[in-house]
Image (spheres, coloured by chain):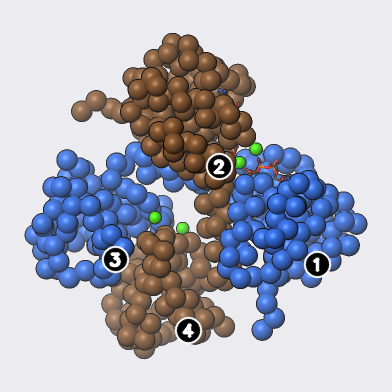
Chain colours: A brown, B blue
Amino acid sequence: MKKKEFAVIGLGRFGGSMVQALSDEGVEVLAIDNDEEKVNQFANIASHAVVGDTTDEAVLKSIGIRNFDHVIVAIGDNIQASILTTLILKELGVKHITVKATNDYHEKVLSRIGADQVVHPERDMGRRIAHNIVSNNVLDYLELSDEHSIVEIVASRRLDGNTLIDLDIRAKYGINIVAIKRGRDIIVSPQATDAIRQGDILIVIGADTDITRFEKNVVEE
Amino acid sequence: MKKKEFAVIGLGRFGGSMVQALSDEGVEVLAIDNDEEKVNQFANIASHAVVGDTTDEAVLKSIGIRNFDHVIVAIGDNIQASILTTLILKELGVKHITVKATNDYHEKVLSRIGADQVVHPERDMGRRIAHNIVSNNVLDYLELSDEHSIVEIVASRRLDGNTLIDLDIRAKYGINIVAIKRGRDIIVSPQATDAIRQGDILIVIGADTDITRFEKNVVEE
Ligand SMILES: Nc1ncnc2c1ncn2[C@@H]1O[C@H](COP(=O)(O)OP(=O)(O)OP(=O)(O)O)[C@@H](O)[C@H]1O
Ligand SMILES: Nc1ncnc2c1ncn2[C@@H]1O[C@H](COP(=O)(O)OP(=O)(O)OP(=O)(O)O)[C@@H](O)[C@H]1O
Ligand SMILES: [Ca+2]
Ligand SMILES: [Ca+2]
Ligand SMILES: [Ca+2]
Ligand SMILES: [Ca+2]
């Protein structure tokens, strides 16, 4: 199988971290920006790095952009440049295009002109961090649906020494502890007789309302 | 218990989404920016919204910032303003300070001057999305440790009709399916005799290397 080739346009904080992460995953990645300084910064991280204004069709053609399997447009503040770049990529027949959106209007236009995936890094992380901050003991979470999540909850002193049988949370709250993080160890599918220690991180799956009840009634001090 | 009061300084994409999300969670949130237009935009979303340059100690004092339980500094591009604001908040005795960092140097300085939590929204989402893009069938994931994750994997046609017993993935790959997302339903702790359907989203927990082996050998077509 031919290795997939990626290109990232716009080397700001988001685009730059995409280049770094793609390169860490061992895939081929071309980094593009119209700011030479940014391009130099990524010369040793990306497989290739080129200076170019991607709102110019000739530039994208000369790079041979249509040969890339997946192009990420990470131009944020200049919405017009982001939209124009996406439009040209689409016309040149790029198979998969992911674009960073700045606001809802921007997202709507991008979807309409054929972006395959639109992402909102700042908005999504804002929500994520707000959620973590408001629920004291929640460290991180994965939204499964509007109503279900997997969350990381720090075991308070109240929980110290309790076994899963003692707590009986499956029956009382309808939620499951799928793993326990203890220091560098991960205990997957903990046994009913396993005792929780203060500071353990409980990985809990269930309905959001049930998880919140559990937090309020059992975890919070 | 007194309701916690939050303040968000800097109403860009990240800070703005924090204000929206905190307000959605039903907590009190004060929104601050030195740009009047931004402040007007959040007048109806935040509990209060004020115009002010937070690098000026007198401004923060007049707002009564020390009475807030948690202050989020979401100034990004102007690193100096972010650092100075954090320093003043610390000196005024604010109990909990979360700051958005722009790069590693910024993060180091923030931690040194006493920020309680430093976040990198663009960097973290860049990593997250790169991971999702490279692993074809992975929709989203929660990192449990450097080596363990919970991931959402789309069931390919190859998996259609197989029960969990057929696949025997716990024995063969050392990983567990903790839930199955099917349309709007979530099946928590699926039974060994449950059959997977194409398009189901499998919520899998385990070591990253084992999950990758499972994806490559069983899921990818
Ligand atoms: N027409 C263009 N062609 C190529 N690169 C461009 C073009 N316009 C902007 N860029 C580059 O895109 C990058 C990201 O843009 P910018 O910093 O404005 O967005 P941002 O959303 O604030 O970024 P961040 O990811 O840091 O939040 C910059 O490095 C900029 O030089
Ligand atoms: N000294 C200051 N006092 C108050 N607000 C400030 C100050 N300096 C900057 N801000 C505000 O902080 C907000 C965010 O800053 P900026 O847009 O530069 O960062 P950013 O990291 O690119 O934002 P984002 O990626 O979240 O959109 C802006 O609305 C700006 O007006
Ligand atoms: Ca998800
Ligand atoms: Ca910016
Ligand atoms: Ca940004
Ligand atoms: Ca985590």
Identity, as a three-letter code, of the amino acid under mark 2: Tyr
Q: Left of B151 or right of it: where is A111? A: right
User: What residue sits right under mark 1 in the picture?
Assistant: B66
Q: Looking at this rendering, what residue extends furthest in the left direction?
A: B166
Callouts 3 and 1 close, C-beta under 8 Å: no
Callouts 4 and 1 close, C-beta under 8 Å: no
Q: N-terminal of the two: label 2 or label 4?
A: 2
Q: Do the residues at discs 2 and 4 belong to one chain?
A: yes
Which-is-in-front pick, marks 3 and 4? 3
Identity, as a three-letter code, of the amino acid under mark 1: Arg
User: What residue sits right under mark 2 in the picture?
Assistant: A105
- Expressed as whole percent of the image width and height from the top left, the position of residue B128 reads 44, 46
Establish if A176 lies above or below A96. below
User: What residue sits right under mark 3 in the picture?
Assistant: B185
Q: Quadrant of the C terminus of chain A?
A: bottom right
Q: Secondary structure at mark 4?
A: helix
Identity, as a three-letter code, of the amino acid under mark 4: Val
Label 4: chain letter: A
Q: N-terminal of the two: label 3 or label 1?
A: 1
Callouts 2 and 4 close, C-beta under 8 Å: no
Q: Do the residues at discs 2 and 1 belong to one chain?
A: no
Q: Do the residues at discs 3 and 2 belong to one chain?
A: no
Identity, as a three-letter code, of the amino acid under mark 3: Asp
Mark carried by residue A218: 4
Mark carried by residue B148: none
Which-is-in-front pick, marks 2 and 1? 2
Question: Tag count in the figure?
Answer: 4
The image quarter in which residue A191 lies: bottom left
Label 3: chain letter: B
- Expressed as whole percent of the image width and height from the top left, the position of residue A215 reads 49, 78
Residue at 63% of width from left, 65% of height from top? B23
Mark pair 4, 1: CA separation: 31 Å
